[in-house]
Image (cartoon, rainbow, N blue to C red):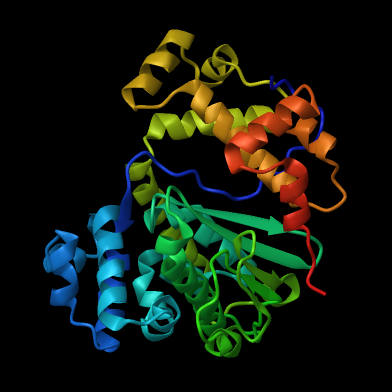
Amino acid sequence: MPNASKNRVECATSAEAAPSTFVGGFVTRGMLVGFQRLGLAPARLCAPAGVSLSELMDPAARVPSTAFWALWREAERLSGDPSLGLHLAQTVPVAAAAGMIGQLVAVSETGLEAIRHLARYQKLIADRMDVAIHEDESTLSIELRLADVDDALGRQVYESCLVGILRILREAIIADLSPLRVSFRHAPPPDVAPYERFFRCPVEFRASSHRLRLPLASLRQPMIAAQPRAQSRLQDLLESELRTLAPEFTVAVAEQIRAALEEHERPTQASVARRLGIGRRTLQRRLRAEGSSFRRIVDREHRNLALGLLGRPGCRVIDVAQAAGFDDATSFAKAFRRWTGESPTAYRARILDRTA
């Protein structure tokens, strides 16, 4: 049972999947442009998706994820390319395909800041993708998870996403950027040489996660087009877009729960309601109206906090359990397995595994 923490709270950036399942129209537009450049006619791809070409090409649309996956299935079938994700991400105009998020990445101060922006606003790209960032003294890892999608279906998207992330950083950052290691959970394609040529590092298949490891020293270098004022304006626009996906009151409650955890307090409905200047029943009623619940939000914030702390070297699992607000390691391990399907010890060992 969670309780108040006495340890300093340091959260990792991680976005929780929303109940609805959409992909940004700017993503499907970029995909279709890329597929066309690979010789796949957009009109032929759209028929099985059950969505019109005009909707898929509308950058402001929220395309149902069923249509998104139908596009990928049809593109795979027509191309016969086992590495279609790699080839698409190498072909598509990646900065343009990322919409305003791509623009924000380009004008960020550093590569590190750009990655944090990407994680912050990834729900505008796909609301069922989780981006977790883990840092230690010299390495940053970006881990991707697609909710309710098996590796056979998602492999092309995972490959496309990690290639796209690296491409947009390489094109925008002053320093030469080569990953330390790239990992995919799925089986390797018949030819892995193109992956090794692009990533310029060891590429691991049948791994425990889909992950890109980058050297922090390179990410701390400035971006070529860094513009603080443009960055601030784009952030304002993206925050506004984000609020349309996540109801404002639910976001406000989550912020107060995080604040309580950072102040080593146990967040309760009564304490969070006081922070918001409302009554407990009002808090309950407004959350219900937005299809949310206090318990669900607290659980999500505990999860995000635990994932972030376990990615830090020198932090024992029992310390993470206490910092994340749990009475003991047993209750923490039970909750963690429910969140991730693995034990905190196994997760921590995997995240902190260094490249030789």
Q: Is residue 228 above or below residue 275?
A: below
Residue appearing at x 26%, y 54% in the figure: 66
Specify whether 107 is left or right of 213: left
Which quadrant would residue 238 be assigned to in this image? bottom left
Specify whether 96 is left or right of 268: left
Residue 184, percent across and down?
A: 58, 68
For the C terminus, give its image quadrant: bottom right
Residue appearing at x 40%, y 12% in the figure: 282
Q: How many marks?
A: 0
For the N terminus, give its image quadrant: top right
Residue 243 visible in this rendered orientation of the protein: yes
Residue 160, percent across and down?
A: 45, 73
Q: Is residue 331 above or below residue 67?
A: above
Residue 230 visible in this rendered orientation of the protein: no
Specify whether 283 is left or right of 169: left
Q: Is residue 102 above or below residue 78?
A: above
Quick one: 108 or 64, which is closer to the camera? 64
Residue 128, percent across and down?
A: 41, 50
Which quadrant would residue 142 be assigned to in this image? bottom right
Residue appearing at x 48%, y 10% in the figure: 280
Quick one: 88 or 236, which is closer to the camera? 88
Residue 8, percent across and down?
A: 79, 37
Q: Is residue 125 above or below residue 268?
A: below
Specify whether 20 is left or right of 194: left
Residue appearing at x 61%, y 67% in the figure: 206
